Amino acid sequence: MAQYKTPGVSIVEKNAFPDSVVEVATAVPAFVGYTASASHDGESLRNQPWRIASMAEFTACFGGAPMPGFMLEAGHAPGTPGGASCTLRQVAGHFLLYHSMQLFFQNGGGACHIVSVGDYHDTPDIGALRAGIDALLQEREVTLLAVPDAMLLALDDCHALQRHMLMHCGQQMRNRFAILDIHNGAAPLTDGPVAAFREGIGSDSLAYGAAYYPWVQATVVPLDELNFTHIRTSHWGALQDLLLQALDAGGQRQVSALFEQMAIAHSSESAQASRIAAIDHALRAMSPLYQQLLLAMHGQLNLLPPGAAMAGLYTLTDNTRGVWKAPANVGIAAVSAPAVNITQDEQEGLNVHGTGKSVNAIRSFAGQGQGTLVWGAHTLDGNSLDWRYINIRRTMIMLEQSLRLAIQAYVFEPNVASTWVTIGSMASNFLTGIWKRGGLAGASPSDAFQVEVGLGTTMTADDLLEGILRVNILVAISRPAEFIELTFQQQMQKS
């Protein structure tokens, strides 16, 4: 109580309401990979986490998409126009982060962190990507981790990096969740990409990660952005020979004239863009085979790992339903189809496996009018009854971090009954709010959670002497209805 020495009226304000727990953000992904540039206001952002909230901010700080380059080899095969065929192989512009970010934002993504570990002139390297992940150790806001460019590494290096991602999330930070892609995930199951992933991913911190198969055929790269300039100039001769084989004499003369203009447009700086557009338009109109080549390039560039799209869907689900809603049975935007169609029987081996390393399926339900859906919500720790589901692991991370930050204000407070009551009521009020929103299971708050703190309950006299305050919290997190069984039986006619 204050001691007054001067006569008058003094005002004393008292807090009427107890301290509260603020729910931490649950969907702030960090993406690690290669970008065209990395700078802001003239300062380098290389290997520094940088927060953005839109694709416009990404391009302003990290540049645009990589320039793809293709090699073309001509040959002959029966059954194709004019007996012509070719092999189209991408040899440049493989980097995946830019187009993955497009998928992320088109699927509901918001604020995120970018760590650029190099530019498009670099060779993808596990050491650089590992250093980019380690740069996130001091960034407490991040709750999700994705590395699309890990798919550019050799198989063993990719799995080693993914093991590092799990260790970063589950052992070092314990406040974030890894979204993993399957190396060579566009290959069918019979080629063994999932089996290789399970063998290489290890057995540590599996509850802190989830994997998705297969890759997806996206629509982020428009077809009208592609033309003959994306084929190496050294292969334009092979391209000309290929197109000529499928045309009559009149068409051959016109195509030959166009290729002469292509050479001029390539060597001239003036009006180059307009000339290229005019030549490309003419080739599309004259040659169906040229259109097929562009479609082939379009398909290869839009073949992307689904991890970034899943990060966007995690964000969308968290914002609309809550982190306790499983990010499954939701459609993926900007995707036309999965790269591999999985049957129900094939998914059984993905969803439940003897190793416990569940892999979530991305399936096409186009015939049912549902499009491409995420059809799984398992962590990699599929044999654990505690941490089998993604939403349970992520909800626990949210509860732990929210309560930890709130109770941190009571460090060095007196370890007495008043402090215990304050902490207990603060935790109970927070968990009651989560229960009312559907995050905890139970008909009443007492069924949904319990908060215990006090001498003789969670602490002994020795704990008090050593300055230890223990709080025990039990929660019943809502679990997804993964398997719904409908039972039908005939009954006797009643009338």
Image: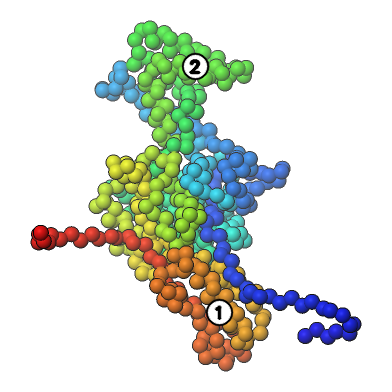
Instruction: Classify 10 Å Cα crowding around label 1: few (below 14), some (14-19), many (20 and above).
Output: many
* Residue under numbered circle 1: 424
Q: How many marks?
A: 2
Indicate which disc residue 279 carries.
2
Residue furthest front as drawn: 495
Residue 204, given in percent of the width and then of the height, sits at 43, 65
Q: Can residue 84 be seen here?
A: yes
Residue in view at x 62 percent, y 87 percent = 416
Instruction: Classify 10 Å Cα crowding around label 2: few (below 14), some (14-19), many (20 and above).
Output: many
Amino acid found under the numbered disc labelled 2: Ile
Which secondary structure, mark 1? helix
Residue furthest bottom as drawn: 461
Residue in view at x 74 percent, y 76 percent = 13
Residue 196, given in percent of the width and then of the height, sits at 35, 53
Q: Earlier in the sequence, mark 2 or mark 1?
A: 2
Which secondary structure, mark 2? helix
Residue 475, given in percent of the width and then of the height, sits at 45, 73
- Judged left or right of residue 422, residue 447 is left
Which image quarter: residue 270? top right
Residue 398, given in percent of the width and then of the height, sits at 52, 65
Nearer to me, 418 or 198: 418
Asked if disc 2 and disc 1 are in contact, CB closer than 8 Å, the reply is no
Above or below: residue 71 compared with residue 203: above
Residue furthest right as drawn: 6
Above or below: residue 409 compared with residue 362: below
Nearer to me, 125 or 495: 495
Amino acid found under the numbered disc labelled 1: Gly
CA gap, disc 2 to disc 1? 73 Å
Indicate which disc residue 318 carries.
none
Residue in view at x 23 percent, y 59 percent = 486
- Judged left or right of residue 317, residue 28 is right
Q: Nearer the viewer, mark 2 or mark 1?
A: 1
